[in-house]
Amino acid sequence: MPKGEQAYLDLCKHVLENGTKKEDRTNTGTYSAFGHQMRFDLSQGFPLLTTKKVPFRLIASELLWFIKGDTNIRYLLQNNNNIWNEWAFKNWVESADYVGPDMTDFGNRSQRDSEFNQVYQKQMGIFKEKILHDDAFAGQFGDLGSVYGKQWRDWKTSSDETIDQLKNVIDSIRNKPDSRRHIVSAWNPEDIPNMALPPCHTLFQFYVAEGKLSCQLYQRSGDVFLGVPFNIASYALLTLLIAHECNLEPGEFVHTLGDAHIYSNHVEQVKTQLGRDNRAFPELKINKDKHSIFDFELSDFELVNYNPHPSIKAPIAV
């Protein structure tokens, strides 16, 4: 098994060298490979990439948002987390309630048109303020539909009951550690039309052996440069938290990808990253005084000895 983040760097090389050039729903274009797996030994450090700085605070606040079962970006904005803004903003500027400047194709135009970008930034600022301070507006335009948190904590059944998958899987790990059914699914076909973005990380499974908890994620679609580093750290953190609650040691995080792709406007950034040296992973300390994953807050995490290369910026495809 490759050590540290080499598994991720190998994925980048594989997609660049062997990927098929494909079009996609964002009209950006990708280099895509189908079917890839990475493994990370969580006893060897917390898998936060070092070949570029990855913002742990954003990863942790997003995961806590999922764990809460929340689907409204207000919580994220309250924690200065903007990673889901574009999808909610798109819903607003394409609605009949929007009366501002034309924001058509904002996701692409704002990257290449500096005058348009100024207008975009102003409208986004207005949008964020309204989400934070206007309850009715936040309720209408801040909610992303039945995305991850909803499926994890409040899956609706055909009999109008709900299933708390996350709570159930923790109970299962505790009481039936050898079960092969420690599974949480975010892919609910009936709810896909009501989601701002159908789940990319669709299903995860836990595995208990020799007092250690491992997790495997199946991700149907992975933005290798921007998204996958977040996904690696997010599910590693989730595994550490559940292992802590269940009095287990952390095992492996196994990341299985379907469509692993590098957007055509991320290629140079990936090459820059591949030219950097691979450093040791940091250590993540969590507040041992808390025992339930549903009680953790951002202040309960401390990242130690994180020494990454500088961040590398790239446009997000919406």
Image: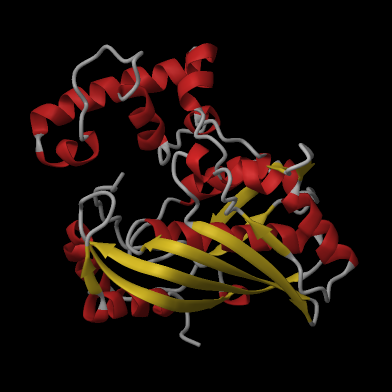
Q: How far across and how far down the image is residue 246, in percent?
A: 82, 62
Is residue 48 at all visible to an observer of this figure? Answer: no
* The residue positioned farthest toward the front in the image shown: 158
303 vs 137, nearest the viewer: 137
Which quarter of the figure has residue 159? top right
Q: Is residue 213 left or right of residue 190?
A: right
Placement of the C terminus among the 4 image quadrants: top left
284 vs 63, nearest the viewer: 63
Q: How far across and how far down the image is residue 153, in percent?
A: 70, 44
Residue located 45% across and 37% down the image: 81
Residue located 20% across and 67% down the image: 272
Residue located 36% across and 13% down the image: 97
182 vs 278, nearest the viewer: 182
184 vs 157, nearest the viewer: 157
Which quarter of the figure has residue 93? top left
Is residue 133 at all visible to an observer of this figure? Answer: yes
Q: Is residue 157 left or right of residue 178?
A: left
Q: How far across and how far down the image is residue 63, in percent?
A: 58, 48
User: What colouring does the structure picture have?
Assistant: secondary structure
* The residue positioned farthest toward the bottom in the image shown: 1
Q: Is residue 35 above or below residue 170?
A: below
Q: Is residue 123 above or below residue 248?
A: above
Residue located 62% across and 64% down the image: 204
